[in-house]
Image (cartoon, rainbow, N blue to C red):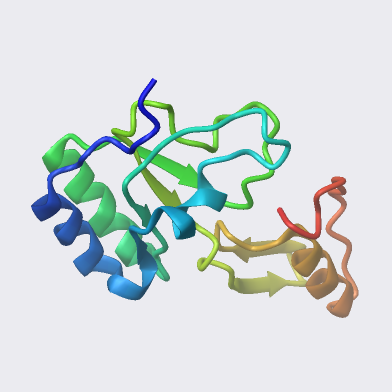
Amino acid sequence: MNDQPFDLDPAVIDRFAAIVGDKYALRDQADIAPYITERRGLWHGRTSLVLRPASVEEVSRIMRLATETGTPIVPQSGNTGLVGAQVPDKSGHDIVLSLSRLNRIREIDVLSNTVTVEAGVILQTLQEAADAADRLFPLSLAAQGSC
């Protein structure tokens, strides 16, 4: 099997890159490598582009463009899943949408005991913020420092 990524239309790649800026549109295979392999090395995929948006608005624009162009998107946060769903398939047709920059805790409401976070918040960071607010976020995972 050919290990080179599927060649997405360069004009389409440029349109996606314009949404997040070139710094956050990874095209070099060395930069892309951590995003296309599951941490244990059991699942591998291919892509020509990893997008790293910083806002919900950028995610929305990416998804609108993906719909318009028929481009499959693979969302990825900590890349700690154990079933391979967070890596693109081997076709190279997918674009990886890394949510790691969406890492803000928006609100800890101590009256209602709720928290509002973005998709890329690290579990341990959330637990520490809850603790600082004299609250407990009771989810604990082995990968909590990286997921």
Q: Residue furthest bottom?
A: 132
Residue 37: % across, % down: 58, 40
Residue 8: % across, % down: 19, 42
Residue 65: % across, % down: 18, 49
Q: From the image, which quarter does the N terminus lie in? A: top left
As drawn, is 92 to the left or to the right of 12? right
Residue 56: % across, % down: 38, 63
Q: Which residue is more in the foreground, 98 or 102?
A: 98
Q: Which residue is more in the foreground, 9 or 111?
A: 9
Q: Quadrant of residue 52?
A: bottom left
The residue sitting at 64% across, 63% down in the picture is 121
Q: Which residue is more in the foreground, 32 or 134?
A: 32
The residue sitting at 54% across, 32% down in the picture is 44
Q: Residue furthest front?
A: 2
Is 85 located above or below residue 77 in the figure?
Answer: above
How many numbered marks, from 0 up? 0
The residue sitting at 28% across, 72% down in the picture is 22
Q: Which residue is more in the foreground, 43 or 110?
A: 43
The residue sitting at 37% across, 59% down in the picture is 28
Q: Residue furthest left?
A: 11
As drawn, is 126 to the left or to the right of 10? right
Is 66 located above or below residue 16 in the figure?
Answer: above
